Image (cartoon, rainbow, N blue to C red):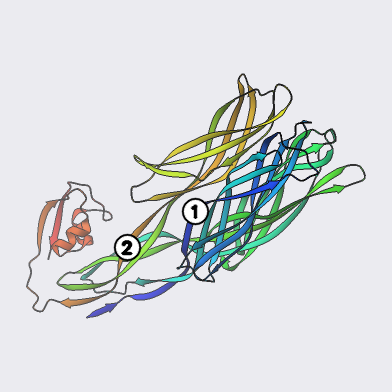
Amino acid sequence: MELEFQAYTMPYLRQTLSKTQNCEETADMVVPDSLPDIDRIVLCSAGVMMRSKQCSGGAVTVSGGIHADVLYCAQEDAEPRRLEVYLPFTVKTDAPDVSDDAQIQFRAWIRSADARMINSRKISVCVNFGCELQAYQPDEITLYQPPEVPENIQLRCCEYPMDFVVDAGEKPFRMTEEVQLPATNPLGDLVLCCKPELEITEQRLAGNKAAFKGLAHISLLYMDENGKPIPYETRFPFSQFCELGAVYDGESLWITPIITGCEVERVTHADQDALSIDLHILAQCTVVRKTSVTLCEDAYAIGGRLKPCWADYTFTDRLDRQTNTYSVREGYSGDVREVLCTQVLADTPEVRRVEGGVEVAVPCTAELLYYDGEGQLQGASVHARAAEKLLLAENADCGAAVENAECSASVSADGAEIRVTMQVCAQCRAQREYRAIKSFEYTPEETPQRRRCAVIARRLCDGETLWEIAKANGTSVQAICDANGLDGDAAETDMLLLIPIS
């Protein structure tokens, strides 16, 4: 007799690409004739702007540009000058498993930005950036529900909580805000640099919409009317939603924002000048559903033979997702009279195996802009490294990303003390193989033997289960539990068990 399990399909988005890579772009620039010769470079600030992404012909391609601001000082005066450099980039990776209609998600961060003098009229700019590419495409998985079976057929079914990506979308939006600068330091004729950073503060699902709120953190460095560089920080809130392909209730939502454009323009009012900041943002949305998957992992027949037919599965279990704060302090030795501003560049996190888990380390570079004892503007780079240990099983792995990084500095006895704080998100997962019965052939005993009820006694060995004992002795787990007064199928090691056999 053949018993077929009831097959049903579960649609989801299969991840066909997950790749992190580091890239480098370089460019040379000649100082315009309208600007003086370079004496020293004091700062290089950069940001990644994504322009387009596509999947075609078995390859995923993302293009965009890096906007770099290079500040330098000339010999004849202490007033800093700005050179604006644009470095286009194209990230292309072979992805034969990714279909042309896949949903591509992209995230990027600056690892290092460096500008060097070739001569007094020419510089070389080198920017290293890291990026993460992910691709999702529609797929479905076939699962099998056990049918009603005779009492002498025993099934062992287990439930496993699984996370499945069920939807992905994106929402481009634009926000334009005016920055009212302090009246004590009115805007002069130059904005030296503008660095925006995005933070998601709230995300939730509302029917078929992904609703999210966040902050755009703006770090400015501008020249005031007296020719002095002034740092200024502000932030603007935003609230948006993205329409999805279905109605959701209880699923999890992840939002990954990326900047696609940034423009700064001077706005003249009757009483005071201001800066208009125009940000173009792409919010990438991922919906994850936690589903309990039931698999029939074993079966046997009391008084007969059972031949199962198997289905094999590979699932990625998301074990844990946590965000930790990494802090590090470093000293800089030099003639520092006053710290003007700082910025930090967090590198790609390094994950390595240690005893009992993994170490997640984040190298970073703190950029320091300061005045020396003679009142000259100077720049310095300080390298640091922060690390934390996470507990993790041997068969699991871990991926990490820096969500936010902040830096501050104060004058010390021998220079400056720099403090870096980073929010690092670590996601632990394990890829596991599963087997489940999808049908079986049952053959009753041809000439049933007359059996007498009997009971045997034996102790439960370490690591042994009641299912294994019942299967080996041709009885059921429920019969063993009833004979020993057990509630459920758990028993202590070395416990003396009465095993009824009929």
Q: Position of residue 419 (x, y in %)?
A: 59, 31
Label 1, label 2: how far apart the Cα atoms are:
28 Å
Q: Is residue 265 above or below residue 373?
A: below
Q: Position of residue 136 (x, y in %)?
A: 50, 65
Q: Please identify the quadrant where the N terminus is shown.
A: bottom left
Q: Is residue 226 left or right of residue 73?
A: right
Q: Amino acid at mark 2?
A: Tyr
Residue 217 visible within the image: no
Q: Residue at x 54, y 53 (%)?
A: 131
- Residue placed farthest to the bottom in the image? 1
Residue 333 visible within the image: yes
Q: Residue at x 40, y 50 (%)?
A: 397
Classify 10 Å Cα crowding around label 1: few (below 14), some (14-19), many (20 and above): some
Q: Quadrant of residue 159?
A: bottom left
Front-lying residue, 177 or 380: 380
Q: Is residue 140 above or below residue 110?
A: below
Label ID, residue 421: none
| Residue corresponding to mark 2 | 434
Front label number (1 vs 2): 1
Classify 10 Å Cα crowding around label 2: few (below 14), some (14-19), many (20 and above): few
| Residue corresponding to mark 1 | 20
Q: Is residue 156 left or right of residue 64?
A: left
- Residue placed farthest to the right in the image? 270
**Number of numbered markers:** 2
Q: Position of residue 140 (x, y in %)?
A: 44, 71
Q: Residue at x 79, y 37 (%)?
A: 223
> N-terminal of the two: label 1 or label 2?
1
Q: Amino acid at mark 1?
A: Thr
